Structures are given as C-alpha cells and as structure tokens.
Image: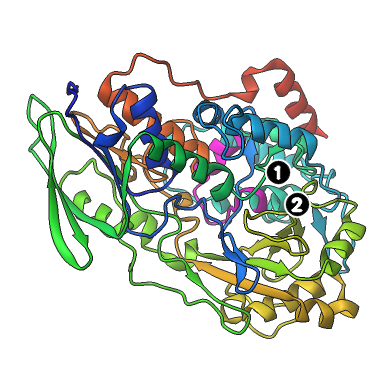
Amino acid sequence: MTTTTSDTRVYLVGGGIASLAAAVFLIRDAGLHGENIRILEELPVVGGALDGTGDPGRGFVARGGRMLEEEAYVCLWDLLETIPTLTDPDRTVKDEVWEFSRKWSSHAGARLIDRDHKILDAADLGLNLRDKAELVRLLALPEHVIGARRIDEFFSDHFFATNFWAMWRTTFAFQNWHSAIELKRYMLRFAQELPRIHTLAGVRRTRLNQYDSIVRPIQQWLADRGVVTEHGTTVTDADFTKDTASGRRITTLHVVRDGRPGTYELGEHDYAFLTLGSMTADAAYGADDRAPELIRDKRDGAFRLWEAIARKAPDFGRPNTFCGNIDANKWESFTLTMRSPLLIHRIQDFSGNAPGTGGLMTFKDSAWLMSLVVPHQPYFASQPEGTYTAWGYALFPDEKGDYIDKTMAEATGQEILTELVHQLGFEDALDEIRATTTVVPVMMPHITSQFAPRRVEDRPLVVPHGARNFAFLGQYTEIPEDVVFTVEYSVRGAMHGVYGLLGVDRPIPGIYHALSDPEAALSTLKAALA
C-alpha cells in the first residue's frame, strides 16, 4: 500500500459513475484534497451510461434507464446519502430517490402483452417441474464448474417460452446465449424480486433520468471541492513497473488531447484508477428519418485502452472476450418525445398505470422483443410542460418487425414508432401520434457485452495482486458474487479500489443475500413453487 501526502495526485481514467464515485470516496473517506484529483474523459460530458440530454425540438434521449433496488444497492445508497440534491442542499439524493419511489411506487398493470394486444396474467410464471429443476441445478453448481457455458446450455425450450423468462430477461437484458454464471449471480442477487417480478414493485426510481438526478449532483459536489475534469482527453496506454517483491506500480499515462499526444507522469505517492471498457462505447444515434449506424471499428477509446494494457500482464483480463462479438452483444433503444398527450393517455387507459407507476411493458410475441416504459413526467430537467417522454428497447434488432418490413437496425425512428403503435393496437391514432412525436433511436454495439460467456481470468481484479498505486474500475472487473450491468457494481468496485489501495478503515457494505433473509427466502420459495 502506498502512503499519501498533501501533494498526492490521483488520476481517474473515464468519467463514468465508477470514476465519479471513486472521486467522492477519495475525498470523503480517504481525506484527499479535491484539487489533486483529475478526471480524464474522452467525451464532452461525464456520467458514462447514466445519460440524459436533448430538447423538445430535436428530441430528448436517454440510452437506457436504471431500475434501482432498495435491498441490493447498498453501496449506491452509501454514496448518494453524501450528495445533496441540486434543488435543496439539506436533502440528499438518496432521500429524494426513496421519497419519490414511495410516492410513485411501481406496480405494473401490463407487464406482458401478447400478439393480440391482450395483457397476460404475468403472475403465472409458467415454470414446470423440469424448469424448476434446471434452475436449482444451475444455482447449485460452483462457478468454476459452470465456466464459459451459456444459459441455453442449461435449460430446455419450454423454459425460454415461459412468462418468467420473458420478464426476467427483459428486466435485466439477458440473451439466451449469455453467460450462465451471470444468470446464476442475478438469480441469487435478486431472488427477492421473484415474488414481484410481474409488477416490478421492488424497483426504486429517480425523479428525473439518472444523469439529471444522480450525475449532475455528484459532479457539482466534486466541482465544489476542486476536482478537475479534463474533457476531450483519451488515455491510450499506461506504463507499469515489472512485478517484483515490492509489487507493481503504474508510472505513466499516455493520452491524446486535441489530436496531440501527451503524458502524465505519476510520482511516488500518486495513484491511477482506470475504467476498462464501456458498455455504451461507440453508441450511435439515429433520428425520425434515419436509422443509427452500427459502429464496429472501436472509435471510442475505452476498449482500445484495455487492449493496450492487457498485453502487459496476464492478470489484466481478456478484453476480446467482451468486445469481440458485437452481433451477440448489441441492442437498440429509443426515446419518444411527444408534443401531444394522446399516446400517454392511451397507454394509461390500457395499462391502468399513470406515468411513473408502471414498469416495462414487454410485447412478448414481438419479433423484436420490444419493451416500453413511461416514466414520471417530466423526465428531463429541461423538459417543458406539455411535452412527454417514454423510453423503450428491443433485444432482437436484426429481426424484421411484425408490422414494418425491416429489421429494427434498418428502421428509422418513425418506423420504430409505427411498429410500437401497432404492437399496442393503437392503429386508429397512428397518424396523430406520428405527427406529434419525435423518436431518437440509439444503437449500442457493446451494451450487454459484460454478460458474454467468460472464464474467471477474463476479468481482472479491481486491485490486481501486487498493485501498489493502481486499480481497475467499471463493469469488466471481477467482484465475486456481485452482478454486472448495475450501477451498484460500478460503485462497489470504486469502494474496493479506493479502500483497498489507500487503506481506508471503513467497511464496505456487505452484498445482500435474499436467501439468508428468512422472510425474503420464504417469499421467494413460495413464488418459485407456485
């Protein structure tokens, strides 16, 4: 462990939630001076996957939406109970989220919709004895035995046709070919959600999108303490000392800024935290009249940095496991900006849910496996009265639509809207809805790459063995028992990195195990055996 001084400098590579959380912990828990912390970010905005931008004219857009969870997200709540909201300095972001979620609690009335536009009885999970036996077998197997096997290697065809799988996979964005280890971890981590998966009653939501509700308050807190963010800065490589009895150190960060190469030299008491990869790397935006591009050549620097440093040590992970199969990892989302309440009102009448009280509405039989959610309005800080937004995504962008003779990947925003309106059975209102709605589709080539089938050595530890002044952050590090594709994972990793390297004498909140909670375990068992 390296000691710190008043001159200790810390470099955080990447401006996602992992780096932002690490910066907070460095100041709050390790006692570092904010002005000595520097965030190096390639993009003109921080927040990573927690985004939210746009305007009524061009359309608002969020690439995704985070469903938070009270029991499981203990590290996130630990972070957010430190950060005041932007509107009330005496109220924390955690307080706001919990109060908002109590007032606008989720209880989906139309979780699953069939091809005839009928709401299915989603409380009927549809699992038979064989399905349950296959689930128990997966949960009982050690991870080293499961290895790099896929989910579809453990289950019969019947399992994949059940209501349970339709809800579970769309809630968490699983594909049948994803890692069986990750499914096992999710089943154990979110077992408490099984009795309420059909209503999503366990979901906690932010008042606005996660950029406005979480990222901006953290950014302000850090700026008030002198933390500097260097935008337009791509870290391309890093130099490390050889692994010796005294450990390994990072000595140099290689960067490109405004097209010019440069370096940061790390002194004896300096640290670097490197975010490896990015699930939103190379996201591309479409429009009403244009499908988004599918970028395959790694224009974003996140995976290129990981590839560069992975060559330097065998325990720095294997990035190609995660970024080497775009067609298995991509999907497409879309954000609706509506200048008429017509579609919102029709959905409310159909589902029985006011905006912000429902959950994902999944069109179970749709060729694209499309889902839609209508958040509480407004969902964007700059969203004016009389403008409404909704967000959706689909897991099968390479399939042709049921109503549009194109794959989703080929479809424009308006064509995606047309498919959606037909899936809802609202064809009579199609012309008015199209005339008053702007759609921004987003193609994300790496969005579920963290679920790729993998072996233990494919993901590096947050603090590699012998590391004295560096740690790895983000969704592609290894944190035993925890689950990727969550904000919690990034925040927990930031805690491990800061506390482990700097010797912070503060416990990291334990991972919640529902099956160790008698009440939660009983509810889960009842739901599973129903």
395 lies left or right of 20:
right
Which is nearer the eye, 270 or 460? 270
- Residue at (65, 69) in percent of width and height: 56
Which is nearer the eye, 263 or 368? 263
Look at the image and give the residue range highlighted in magenta: 170-188
Answer with the quarter of the image where residue 131 lies: top right
Residue 162's disc is: 2
| Relative image position of residue 77 (x, y in whole percent) | 56, 29
Quarter of the figure with the C terminus? top right
| Relative image position of residue 308 (x, y in whole percent) | 20, 55
The tally of labels here is 2
Height in image: 460 above or below 453? above
Which is nearer the eye, 347 or 30? 30
Height in image: 350 above or below 337? above
Give the residue type that dot 1 points to. Asp
Answer with the quarter of the image where residue 71 lies: top right
> Circle 1 — which element?
helix
| Relative image position of residue 91 (x, y in whole percent) | 61, 29
Quarter of the figure with the N terminus? top left
Viewer-nearest of labels 1 and 2? 2
| Relative image position of residue 508 (x, y in whole percent) | 44, 21
Residue 165's disc is: none
270 lies left or right of 199:
left
**Sequence-earlier tag: 1 or 2:** 1
The residue to which callout 1 is attached is 131
Give the residue type that dot 2 points to. Thr
Q: State the separation of the CA atoms marked 1 and 2.
A: 9 Å
User: Answer yes or no: do the residues labelled 1 and 2 have beta carbons within 8 Å?
Assistant: yes
